[in-house]
Image (cartoon, rainbow, N blue to C red):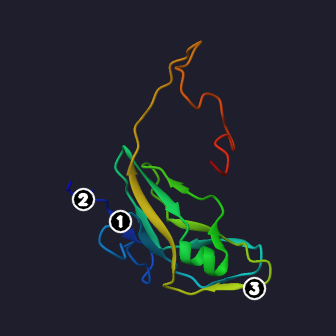
């Protein structure tokens, strides 16, 4: 097992919670709201977490929806996954949306609203080419593998 990546984090509000894993082996850390907000059907809003982080160069943070909120209440993240670049030092906020056509949903202070996954990301450079290597898939795109075998 590799050593953990140590990331400086700053609480911006007294009620901010440091993102944390719910279970050993989880990939995502729970992010919590620092403000209460009610999302009406099809409404979206930015929910603050009260923390800022300093990701090392070569890493990025990905903010993902929580599956329980999605299936039980239709709550998701508009720009899923949200991307946190290594040079960003502002407050982490989650752009949430209520996809339920009928019911409002209230987020309370301290509620788990999203998951944060930290991953290494390489710096890449493109090399222009007149040809690309061949694959079995080729240019097959959206739906090219079908639904049934």
What residue lies at 42% left-to-right and 49% top-to-bottom? Answer: 86
**N-terminal-most mark, 2 or 3:** 2
Frontmost of labels 2 and 3 is 3
Q: How would you rate the neighbour count of disc 3 (Cα within 10 Å): few for under 14, some for 14-19, many for 20 or more?
A: some
Which element carries disc 2, helix, strand or loop? loop
In the image, residue 51 lies at what x, y percent? 44, 70
Q: Are marks 1 and 2 in contact (CB under 8 Å)?
A: no
* Numbered marks: total: 3
Report the residue that reaches farthest toward the right.
102
Frontmost of labels 1 and 2 is 2
Q: CA–CA distance between discs 1 and 2?
A: 15 Å
Residue 9, label in figure: 1
Frontmost of labels 1 and 3 is 3
In the image, residue 16 lies at what x, y percent? 43, 79
Which element carries disc 1, helix, strand or loop? strand
Is 13 situated above or below 147?
A: below
Is 121 situated above or below 38?
A: above
- The residue at which mark 2 appears reads as 4
Is 107 situated above or below 145?
A: below
In the image, residue 57 lies at what x, y percent? 36, 45
**N-terminal-most mark, 1 or 2:** 2
Q: Are marks 2 and 3 in contact (CB under 8 Å)?
A: no
Which element carries disc 3, helix, strand or loop? loop
Report the residue that reaches farthest toward the top.
130
Q: CA–CA distance between discs 2 and 3?
A: 41 Å
Residue 103, label in figure: 3
What residue lies at 60% left-to-right and 28% top-to-bottom? Answer: 138
């Amino acid at each position: 097992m590799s050593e953990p990546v140590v990331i400086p984090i700053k609480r911006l509000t007294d009620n901010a919670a440091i993102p944390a894993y719910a279970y050993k082996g989880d990939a995502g850390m729970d992010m919590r709201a620092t403000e209460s907000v009610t999302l009406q059907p099809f409404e979206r809003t930015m929910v603050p977490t009260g923390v800022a982080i300093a990701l090392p160069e070569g890493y990025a943070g990905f903010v993902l929806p929580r599956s329980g909120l999605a299936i039980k209440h239709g709550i998701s993240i508009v720009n899923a996954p949200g991307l946190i670049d290594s040079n960003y030092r502002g407050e982490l906020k989650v752009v949430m949306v209520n996809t339920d056509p009928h019911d409002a949903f209230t987020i309370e202070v301290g509620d788990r609203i999203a998951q944060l996954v930290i991953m290494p990301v390489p710096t890449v450079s493109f090399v222009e080419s007149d040809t690309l290597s061949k694959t079995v898939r080729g240019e097959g795109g959206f739906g090219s593998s079908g639904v049934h075998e």
